[in-house]
Image (cartoon, rainbow, N blue to C red):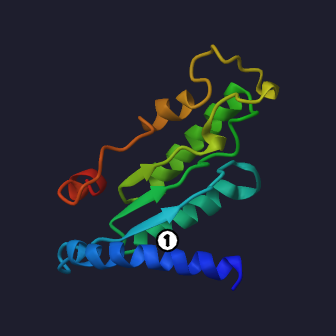
Amino acid sequence: MDRRSILKGALGTALVPVYASAVPAIAKTSAERFSFVFLSDTHIRPELDADRACAMCFDQVSASPADFVIHGGDHIEDALEADRVRAVMLMDLYQRTERAHLRKPVRHVLGNHDCLGVFPKSGIAPDEPGYGKQFYIDRFGPRHMPSITRASISSCWIP
């Protein structure tokens, strides 16, 4: 028996009791079910019509039956080494595109490309306003979500 087989067996055995006990708790009527779209790494920028392609993607998501969207980060390309003017322009472009084309509630997750001035090439000092993760927070709010429970899921995830 190789290591991979042992790990698969151990993982499967560990998950069976959790899955079996969770099924009745998450079984929902069709009126209580929901679906969502997870998208990530839009890396929006104006070059090569990337913003138009992002808008087309958002239009398709908007036409879907999904109840909400989770954006997994890296909204823009790229605040890490760009100067402040470029980073703000990219984030403005992303947010304009989202507002115009993504007609679903969206929850955002911080991506590394969404952090301002982390690389020295940017010319942005760590003590400047909006540096690092604060750039994302200023645009999308806190990086955490409230605790999720079955009772709060509809109020937390589906506004």
Q: Quadrant of the N terminus?
A: bottom right
**Residue 112: % across, % down:** 64, 42
> Which residue is painted at 53% across and 62% down in the image?
39
- Left or right, 145 with respect to 53, comes to left
- Left or right, 151 with respect to 75, comes to left
- Left or right, 31 with respect to 69, comes to left
Q: Which residue is mark 1?
A: 60
Along the viewing direction, whichever of 49 and 119 lies nearer the viewer: 119
> Which residue is painted at 64% across and 82% down in the image?
5
Q: Quadrant of residue 117?
A: top right
Residue at the extreme right of the image, as rendered: 121
Residue at the extreme bottom of the image, as rendered: 1
Given the image, on which type of amino acid does mark 1 rest? Gln
> Which residue is painted at 54% across and 81% down in the image?
9
**Residue 95: % across, % down:** 51, 44
- Left or right, 43 with respect to 119, comes to left
> Which residue is painted at 41% across and 35% down in the image?
142
